[in-house]
Amino acid sequence: MTEERSRRKTGARTAPARVSAIGVIGVIGELFITAGVLVFLFLGWQLWLNDLVVGADQNRVGVALARNWDAGTPTHAHVTPAVAPDYGPPAVAEPPKNAVKFAVMYVPRFGSDYARSISEGVGTTDVLDKNGIGHYPGTQMPGAVGNFAVAAHRTTHGAPFKQLATLTVGDKIYVQTQDGYYTYDFRGLEYVRPTAVDVLDPVPRAPGATPTERVLTMTSCNPMFSAAERIIAYSVLESWQPTSAGPPPAILATVSAKG
Amino acid sequence: MYAALWRLMPGPLWLRVVLMVALFAAILAGLVLVVFPWLNTFVNVNDVTVNQ
């Protein structure tokens, strides 16, 4: 205030020019600050808020899909028999059309509410950004001898595989389809170059080998927030049970959650 | 800029505060609901598939 008053006294001619120059610089400064705030808002939205919203959405879609399949089957008070009944070889479905959701994945390690749908195809805009997990076309279906390979985001768009690196040997990964529940046993992680398509082979990384095991391969980006490498998670089918047998006890609460 | 915006607001102090808060909330909603999702389609730093 005193500065302005003294300026008015000393020179009436230069004062307006200096004031407007300060005003212009002030506006430019405010624009820069606003731009910075907007960038941080966008990052916060993209890397945190939107993941929470889209992730919760994807879980709801997964549970709704599962409900559709096991409607009418008892999902409560499931008694585990002393000897696991033999349901024979796992049912193997035909691959659906592109972007059609055909399975739900449950990973207790990723959270008790984790239930994400798996769609056919690995297109960025039509499957990975929109639906979540995508199945590599041409690789085997759940339960088939060979390689059931899927991909999903590790950051942004709901980030279904955000916690892929937290899997530990022996963790169970459950895949539900219209036919039943496939329990996969996590074996290990691998870090490869983006061009390492042999991780999708019927026997991963062994082109031409005859498969005997039923493998689940999950791929995502590595390191997080980058596309320089790929993180690969391998699991092997441990057991299978038809829809009529009800969900495995470990995912009972997730499956019967309100969708 | 923001000072000019403040001067543009009509009415007593409480009304100006309410209007400013409403204005910024509206801008934030527009960003989160329209601008950010649109911007996100151009940001693809996370390729997750293996291919040749």
Image (cartoon, coloured by chain):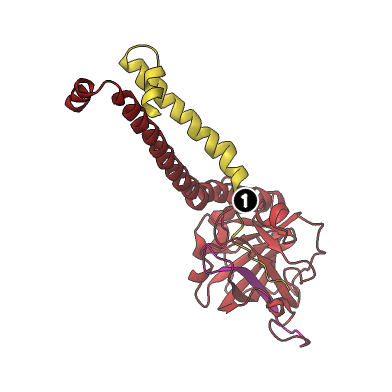
Chain colours: A red, B yellow
Q: Is residue B27 left or right of A131 when viewed as pictured?
A: left
Asked where in the image residue A240 lies, by quadrant, the reply is bottom right
Question: Nearest the camera: A203 or A226?
Answer: A226
The answer to whether residue A77 of the structure is visible from this angle is: no
Percent position (x, y) of residue A123?
73, 59
Q: Is residue A226 magenta?
A: yes
Percent position (x, y) of residue A185?
59, 75
Residue A242, compared with residue A28, is above or below; it is: below
Q: Residue furthest top?
A: B11
The answer to whether residue A205 of the structure is visible from this angle is: yes
Badge 1: chain ID: A
Q: Which image quadrant: the C terminus of chain A? A: top right
Q: Residues within 10 Å of mark 1 (few under 14, many from 20)?
A: many
Q: Is residue A29 left or right of A169 when viewed as pictured?
A: left
Question: Nearest the camera: A25 or A189?
Answer: A25
User: Residue placed at 51% from the left, 33% from the top?
Assistant: B29
SS at badge 1: helix
User: Residue placed at 75% from the left, 78% from the top?
Assistant: A145
Question: Nearest the camera: A13 or A216?
Answer: A13
Q: Which image quadrant: the N terminus of chain A? A: top left
Q: Is residue B42 magenta?
A: no
* Residue linked to disc 1: A63
Percent position (x, y) of residue B9?
40, 17
Percent position (x, y) of residue A142?
72, 68
Report the label total: 1
Q: Label 1 sits on what residue type?
A: Val
Residue A75, compared with residue A9, is above or below; it is: below
Asked where in the image residue A34 lies, by quadrant, the reply is top left
Residue A64, compared with residue A116, is above or below; it is: above
Span highlighted in magenta in the image: A210-227
